[in-house]
Amino acid sequence: MLWILFPLGFYALMFRFIRGLGASTALTDAFPWGLWVGFKLFAVALAGGGFTLAAVVYIFNIARYRPILRPMVLTAFLGYSMFISSLIIDLGRPYRVWHPVVMWNPHSVMFEIAWCVMLYTTVLFLEFVPAVFERLGWERPQRWLHAAMIPIVIAGVILSTLHQSSLGSLYLIVPEKLYPLWYSPLEPVFFFTSSLCAGLAMTIFESWHSSRSFGKQLDFPLLSGLGRVLAVVLSLYLTVRTLDLVHRGVLGLLRQPRTETYMFLLEGALLFVPMFLLFRPRVHNNPTWLYFSSVLVLLGLVTNRMNVAITGMQASSGTYYFPKWSEFAITLSLVALAFSLFWLAAKYLPIFPASAHGKASSATKEPLPELVHAGP
């Protein structure tokens, strides 16, 4: 599939920069944000597990989750890298992407998002680069970063929390444009909470595929624990969203036969079903069912981001938007690139713990000689 997606995506990318947004996309002045904005919102949500696990391991010193940390940080780093790539592609004048560095506007949500993206991507790089140093055998840079890791992690937690919630704050300025099923004063809370769900589900998803690809995976008890945590966070997210709908008195909109109604119900079903499943021990203790539940969560959150960015905004715009082939091609090629980079990192860098690919069995044999010598 890479041989198909990469050339097609490269051609679409050249078409976009040579012909411009108007010719290469279905975007218009009436509907200027489309597929790439929804994709960016989801790509950033994948970072939710990274800053959560970093805080758990380094700040709260819960060491048993350390094997999960590197895959989550790698996922977060790739998610933010995809965000930046799609942002540059989506900008009308991408050569001005550096302007927020020198042209400050602290009253703008977009300005805060720009700075959080730049700073947190740097933090994720610093959190991930010890794996590279370990692979190269560079011990001194490893010690330097280890000594500074707690302040780095604290900065990352603050920046990512600000950024995830600020993406929701961005939609607070369009109460007349975003459909009431998605518009809420609690949008920053919803974006932040759902990003935690996305990060946890993506770790389960990538571990299952890494196991099938080249026999590297996390210890299943840790993944089962992630499944239980995911069920709790999902239930919190869905409960607060339901109470918000009731409080704002918009549940009656679900009786209207509209596209927004059907897409909202699809989004809810894709999230409610895995929440119900993950509370059952036979599900979160079964690798196949756990993987299936994580896929449903990811599909539900993709649907949510696309609903906020596209479905919920179309009625007020007075126009109909459906992405052109070039928008799909570039988006899929970015996803393929992220999968390829994760595959390369998992193959050549110490991303997964040694016990995950066969070394634990040899470690269990070390005490045997002592037992022999201890005999009569």
Image (spheres, grey):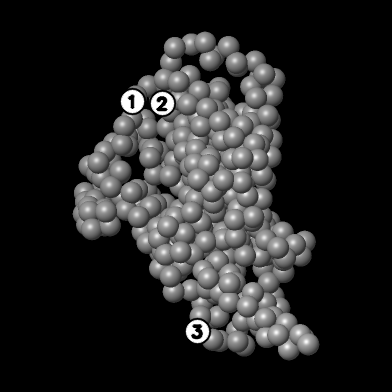
Do tag 3 and tag 2 residues touch (Cβ < 8 Å)? no
- Asked whether, in this view, residue 370 is left or right of residue 89, the answer is right
Q: Is residue 198 above or below residue 155?
A: above
Q: Which residue lies at the image location 63% right of the left edge and 50% below the top edge?
A: 224
Do tag 2 and tag 1 residues touch (Cβ < 8 Å)? yes
Separation of disc 2 and disc 1 at Cα? 6 Å
- The residue that mark 2 highlights is 314
Residue 122, given in percent of the width and then of the height, sits at: 55, 66
- Asked whether, in this view, residue 47 is left or right of residue 342, the answer is right
- Who is closer to the viewer here, 351 or 320? 351
- The residue that mark 1 highlights is 320
Disc nearer the start of the sequence (3/1):
3
- Does the rendering let one see residue 196? no
Separation of disc 3 and disc 1 at Cα? 52 Å
Residue 172, given in percent of the width and then of the height, sits at: 59, 34
Three-letter code for the amino acid on which mark 1 is drawn: Tyr
Q: Quadrant of the C terminus?
A: bottom right
Q: Is residue 11 above or below residue 29?
A: below
Do tag 3 and tag 1 residues touch (Cβ < 8 Å)? no
Q: Residue furthest front?
A: 376
Query: Crowding near pointer 1: few (<14 within 10 Å), some, many (20+)?
Result: some
- Does the rendering let one see residue 281? yes
